[in-house]
């Protein structure tokens, strides 16, 4: 027991330390997932040993601390939290619970909103005039941020009088910063060596809690109102939806993404829609909030300690997850650059299993201080290769870890490696099978010669069995060579040969791109094609001429020149354009 108590104490201290940074300094020390893992460990222990729960445990508070520089405000109606769920089954359970409690009603309507990722604010209007604005703080005591809130353009200092304004009404909402604004502010901060924020939520909090309100005014904060706290008389509409419409009439900012749903299936539809379109929103959200629409029904359901029974937050899947680095391997790119790749214990991101993360270069490994066996936070934004955000240091000493050894020789061809700044490269060129394979894959890719049906596995076999050495060799493939590969019959071989045949008719721009010259992507390839018209002029172009081409600077010009200085490359181009192969545009 002694041990458990100590463990609980340690977890609480850890969370309090992180809270301090998060809420007071507006700069998180750790990522959300790391925080959640420790919070979960504490919750689990407290569930097992309820006698050890204390009122001041981080599990019992809604988070947030009052900073000293602002005067304190006691919320007459506490600013509570929301219970949250992560899966459809829990939503079904919520709906069932609500319907059981309200079994005398035929159907229950829900008003679904976005769960905005900002900071909660309370706006007190007396006779229609904004007299007090406060942060949530710990839910009971917040900070007086009236002067700062007054500078937020969308928050009215006076409500529009529609003859319906109560003498006293406390509006609750979320203060947020748009993604675009966040990027702009950080960009300026970087230039001026100022404070860079970790995410829009921290930027919103940091901008609001400025001693000098003129700074807040310059941060273009926004606000969306979603509820009522204190009210002097019950003159409100009868449903949450209508309440939001009333807010709009008073000139209060309300999100226009709200959806009135009847029953579970409609809520799921809204959730899926938001999940699929969240990247299009101007603001960060972390889920949707489902609220029983009728205010009378809300009253009948009431509250549990920290949260209402009539609402729940359905969180969107996290973009960050924890996993373990099983190994770090070194891959060789088309141009010989050696790239470290972390092989991970597979984790699911919205149903897709992720088992690799890019480490970019040596510097990235040094920056992270990564070791094999480390527990790491990985982030997957959109559909790009996931990145390692940071290492969970607390886990390092509980697991077996080992240092990452950088290769001295090319892991594929065994040639010597060259190091330049943070990049190591195999300079063996086409002697290196890895580079040969990558060059071939690039040559036939969609934006290059677009040869349908030849996948990576076929290229790997063609090179491993020495059936193809150069890109020109692809056009010398025949039925015999192709059917000697795994699982390729006559029919599929013929399809591949037909695809190769039609790829011979291409464009000059595609051909230049297909050559795989360092840093010449499809746009630069198109500019080169426009400028030089034919390959012989491009092959002899010098740097002075090349830098006249749109978008081509000295570095790319040098890459182009170096490429055509290599006799091997010229030989392959001549081969491709020879009458025997007959590539043309
Ligand atoms: S209603 C009593 N609606 O989420 C319930 N909250 O976890 C009061 N939040 O402190 C909250 N968007 O800061 C509500 N549409 C929304 C919200 C929302 C974001 C935040 C709010 C609250 C926290 C609860």
Image: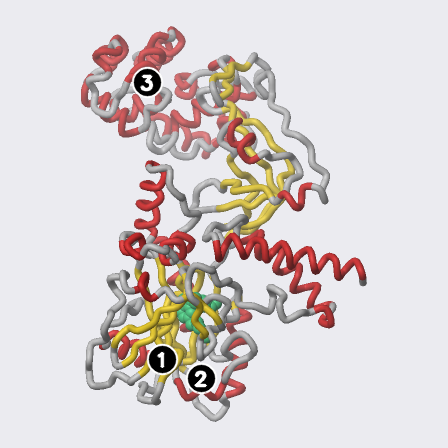
Residue in the image at 34% along x and 51% along y: 179
**Towards the viewer: 74 or 27:** 74
Nearer the viewer's eye, disc 2 or disc 3?
A: 2
Quarter the N terminus occupies: bottom right
* Residue 337 screen position, x and y as percent: 48, 22
Q: Give neighbour class at mark 2: few <14, some 14-19, many 20+ (Cα, 10 Å).
A: many
Q: Is residue 277 visible?
A: no
**Towards the viewer: 146 or 92:** 146
Q: Give neighbour class at mark 1: few <14, some 14-19, many 20+ (Cα, 10 Å).
A: many
SS at circle 3: helix
* Residue 137 screen position, x and y as percent: 47, 66
Q: Give neighbour class at mark 3: few <14, some 14-19, many 20+ (Cα, 10 Å).
A: few
Q: Which mark is residue 481?
A: none
Q: Are marks 1 and 2 in contact (CB under 8 Å)?
A: yes
Q: Mark 2 near ligand 1 (CB under 8 Å)?
A: no
Marks 1 and 2, how far apart in space?
9 Å
Which residue lies under the disc numbered 3? 555
Residue placed furthest toward the right: 1
* Residue 159 screen position, x and y as percent: 23, 75
Q: Are marks 1 and 3 in contact (CB under 8 Å)?
A: no
Q: Mark 3 near ligand 1 (CB under 8 Å)?
A: no
SS at circle 1: helix
Ligand 1's image quarter is bottom left
Which residue lies under the disc numbered 2? 298
Which residue lies under the disc numbered 1? 240
The disc, 1 or 3, on the residue closer to the chain's N-terminal end is 1
Residue in the image at 32% along x and 27% along y: 521
Marks 1 and 3, how far apart in space?
60 Å
């Amino acid at each position: 027991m002694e041990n458990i108590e100590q463990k609980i104490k340690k977890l609480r201290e850890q969370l309090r330390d992180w809270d301090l940074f998060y809420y007071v300094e507006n700069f998180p020390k750790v990522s959300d997932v790391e925080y959640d893992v420790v919070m979960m460990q504490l919750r689990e222990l407290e569930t097992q040993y309820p006698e050890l729960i204390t009122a001041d445990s981080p599990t019992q508070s809604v988070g947030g601390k009052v900073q000293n520089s602002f005067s304190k405000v006691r919320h007459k109606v506490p600013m509570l939290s929301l219970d949250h769920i992560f899966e459809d089954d829990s939503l079904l359970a919520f709906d069932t619970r609500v319907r059981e409690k309200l079994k005398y009603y035929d159907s229950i309507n829900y008003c679904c909103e976005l769960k905005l990722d900002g900071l909660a604010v309370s706006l007190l209007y007396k006779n229609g005039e904004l007299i007090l604005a406060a942060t949530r703080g710990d839910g009971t005591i917040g900070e007086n941020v009236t002067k700062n809130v007054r500078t937020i353009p969308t928050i009215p200092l006076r409500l529009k009088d529609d003859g319906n304004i109560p003498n006293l009404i406390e509006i609750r909402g979320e203060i947020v910063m748009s993604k675009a604004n966040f990027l702009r502010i950080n960009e300026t901060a970087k230039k001026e060596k100022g404070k860079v924020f970790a995410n829009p939520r921290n930027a919103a909090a940091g901008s609001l809690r400025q001693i000098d309100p003129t700074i807040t005014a310059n941060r273009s904060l926004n606000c969306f109102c979603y509820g009522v706290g204190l009210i002097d008389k019950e003159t409100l509409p009868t449903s949450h939806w209508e309440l939001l419409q009333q807010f709009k009439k008073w000139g209060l900012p309300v999100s226009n993404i709200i959806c009135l749903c009847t029953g579970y299936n409609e809520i799921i539809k809204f959730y899926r829609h938001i999940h699929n379109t969240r990247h299009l929103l101007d603001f960060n959200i972390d889920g949707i909030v489902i609220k029983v629409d009728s205010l009378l029904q809300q009253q009948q359901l009431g509250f549990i300690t920290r949260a209402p029974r009539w609402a729940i937050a359905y969180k969107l899947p996290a973009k960050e997850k924890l996993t373990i680095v099983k190994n770090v391997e070194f891959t060789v790119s088309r141009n010989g650059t050696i790239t470290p790749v972390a092989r991970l214990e597979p984790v699911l991101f919205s149903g897709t299993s992720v088992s690799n993360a890019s480490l970019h270069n040596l510097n990235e490994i040094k920056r992270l201080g990564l070791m094999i066996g480390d527990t790491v936070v990985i982030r997957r934004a959109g559909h790009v290769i996931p990145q390692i955000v940071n290492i969970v240091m607390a886990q390092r000493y509980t697991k077996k870890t080992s240092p990452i050894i950088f290769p001295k020789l090319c892991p594929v061809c065994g040639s010597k490696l060259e190091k330049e700044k943070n990049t190591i490269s195999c300079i063996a060129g086409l002697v290196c099978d890895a580079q040969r394979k990558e060059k071939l894959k690039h040559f036939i890719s969609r934006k290059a010669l677009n040869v349908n049906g030849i996948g990576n596995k076929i290229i790997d076999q063609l090179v491993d069995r020495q059936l193809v050495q150069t890109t020109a060799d692809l056009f010398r493939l025949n039925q015999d060579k192709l059917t000697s590969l795994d699982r390729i019959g006559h029919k599929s071989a013929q399809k591949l040969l037909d695809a190769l045949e039609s790829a011979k008719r291409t464009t000059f721009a595609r051909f230049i791109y297909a050559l795989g010259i360092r840093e010449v992507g499809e746009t630069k390839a198109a500019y080169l094609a426009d400028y030089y018209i034919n390959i012989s002029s491009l092959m002899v172009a010098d740097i002075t001429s090349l830098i006249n081409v749109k978008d081509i600077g000295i570095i790319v010009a040098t890459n182009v020149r170096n490429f055509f200085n290599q006799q091997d490359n010229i030989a392959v181009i001549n081969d491709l354009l020879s009458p025997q192969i007959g590539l043309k545009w």
